[in-house]
Image (cartoon, grey):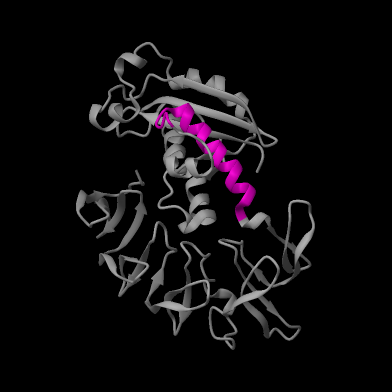
Amino acid sequence: MKNFAAIDFETANYSRSSVCSIGVVIVRNGQIVDRIYHLIRPTPNYYLHRFTTEIHGIGSADTAHAEEFPDVWAKIAPKIANLPLVAHNSPFDEGCLRAVHAVYGMEYPNYTFHCTYRASRKVLGDVLPNHQLHTVAAHCGFDLTNHHHALADAEACAVIALKLWQSEGEGLAEVELNGKWGYINQAGEVVVPIKYDIAQSFSEGLAYVVSTGTDGTITRAGYIDRNDNLVIPYFHTDVDDPNWRDIEFPQYFQCGLASYRENGRYGFMNKKGEKIIPAEYDLTVAFEDDIAVVFKNGKAGVIDKQNKVVIPFEYDSIRPNDDFFMIRLNKKYGYIDRKNNLIIPPIYDQCSPF
């Protein structure tokens, strides 16, 4: 993706609509062509000094005479028309944009968002200790000295996007022709033959594929490298299972591990195909920052790469996000930290990651 707008919001308080500054960096043909920054008088108009001003340095005096969001957005919207939007941890920025449109009664144009945080987890995996903005920016060669300034963060996001999406999928894209899948490079050359029934994206150098013969039998299955070498022979269910297409396919490799399925349960294997975490879980979510959410007996917990339980199996669901984990318990949502300390009790009907 060479044409997009990277966007970052800072907020005055816990309300997603309380945007107090915005940074936008416009990229066309792989080059930064415009940088936009505005202070905004927030709605609601108050600041939580400890939780916002101390982070981004913006206070009431800075925005007392600033324009409100509709006036600011009227200047920005024409410049980003028809461009996808990119943000680091996009649910937050998309949530802000939706919320502030709603609070002013503005029609929301259903912008398409892409997330560099998720892209970093997929492309870089365990190369980095974490996938926070400043960490990924440094890895991509951007000096984010002015972190939490909306324009600096937006520019860091733009640089990350250009770097990661250049390398995402090992520079290869999945393509379908006559019901079969293969991979091409950015010059349009076929790198991996178009012969597979299933072809997932490359991640950490490997991609899961399945091919069948004319009689429908499995002829090849497992993880290939970009030279079409079968590195890890593996099929995600019983070879004789006629419903194999309906069984969930393996996850991408992240942090050097991917899930495998055995006797209807799930574990994790490494890039040698070694099953290093036994298939003892009802369901697994891909590793992020060397931890993974897994389910056992209907409850969610968190394990590390040594299969040590980091957060016990006592929640209906868990969603990691940096230092705070969103939890669901008895149909209510709250937050815990990485040591399972309760930060915000589960009393809410809905919530989103910080």
Q: Position of residue 136 (x, y in %)?
A: 47, 44
- In the image, residue 265 sits, relative to residue 68, either above or below, namely below
Position of the C terminus, as image quadrant, is top left
Seen in the picture, residue 49 relative to 192 is either above or below; the reply is above
Quadrant showing the N terminus: top right
Q: Position of residue 152 (x, y in %)?
A: 47, 29
- Span colored in magenta: 145-168
| In the foreground, 354 or 257 | 257
Taking the image as shown, residue 192 lies to the left or right of residue 110, namely right
Could you say which is closer to the camera, residue 45 or residue 353? Answer: 353
Residue 211 within the magenta-colored segment of the rendering: no
Q: Residue at x 57, y 61 (%)?
A: 203
Give yes or no for residue 161 being in the magenta stretch.
yes
Above or below for 66 versus 285: above
Residue for point 56% across, 29% down: 25
The residue lying furthest to the bottom in this view is 240
Q: Position of residue 197 (x, y in %)?
A: 68, 72
The rendered magenta stretch, by its main secondary structure, is classed as helix
In percent of the image, x 31 and y 14: which residue is there?
A: 61
